[in-house]
Amino acid sequence: MAISDRKERQKAQLRELILDAARDIVVREGFAALSMRKIADAIEYSPATLYLHFENRDAIARAICAAGYADFARELVPAMENEPDPIQRLQIMARSYVAFGLAHPETYRLIFMVSPEYASALSEGNDEERAGEKAFFELVGAFTQLRGTNRLNTELTDLQLAEMLWASLHGIVSLKLTCPLFVSQSAQDLAQQTLQTQLYGLLDAPARPEN
């Protein structure tokens, strides 16, 4: 291996080490506790080393949020893209959203429940870093397809419908993570029932969605 290749690999490894340490701090203590010195202490490097990889602590915070959104989108987008029927795509979205939140609670809390200050990571950067935004607009597209077949009976825009469903799913996952005794049924059942109820109010001739 060439010296330059080895240096690039070491640089990438150190960058991931910094992000992992920052993520652990945020999950345990919140974004307010994040500092370059605390990260440096955690990985046993000098703070000056961190500045070789990130401009400041805000750049690190945005990077760990962007990585979280990318993980989230990898769970949602491929399955939705491969399903041509819009109602089935909405069902897949609901199932995948809840499954991700419950399987990866720390990541979910990080990107959706810790701080709105870094929510801009949802739509910043390159295509991979904007993966969270892509997941949302896959949801918008499902409603757009339904509207294109004249099946929607509502004056709400596709964006508003997507926001309504996303908010419902976020509420379900958040309750399960923070107050599980409040929700007596499974999160997946509640998500599908919520989607079904919303669709009955939106479709001209709704067919009962399959669970």
Image (tube, helix red, strand yellow):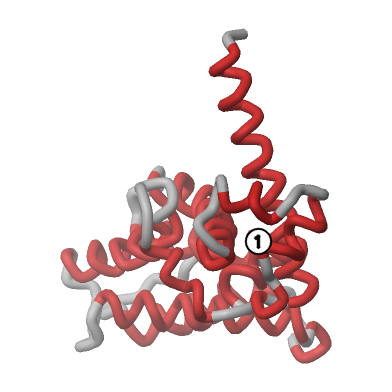
**Which residue is tagged 1?**
99
The structure residue drawn at horizontal position 64% and vertical position 60%, both measured from the top left corner, is 100
The answer to whether residue 47 of the structure is visible from this angle is yes
Residue 74 against residue 62 in the figure, above or below: above
Instruction: Give the camera-side residue of 21 and 43.
Output: 43
Mark 1 packing: few (<14 Cα in 10 Å), some, or many (20+)?
some
Q: Residue furthest top?
A: 1
Percent of width and height locating residue 161:
34, 80
The answer to whether residue 196 of the structure is visible from this angle is no
Q: Amino acid at mark 1?
A: Ala
Residue 173 is drawn in which quadrant?
bottom right
For the C terminus, the quadrant is: bottom right
For the N terminus, the quadrant is: top right
The structure residue drawn at horizontal position 79% and vertical position 72%, both measured from the top left corner, is 28
The structure residue drawn at horizontal position 37% and vertical position 63%, both measured from the top left corner, is 123
Whether residue 4 sits left or right of residue 138 in the image: it is right
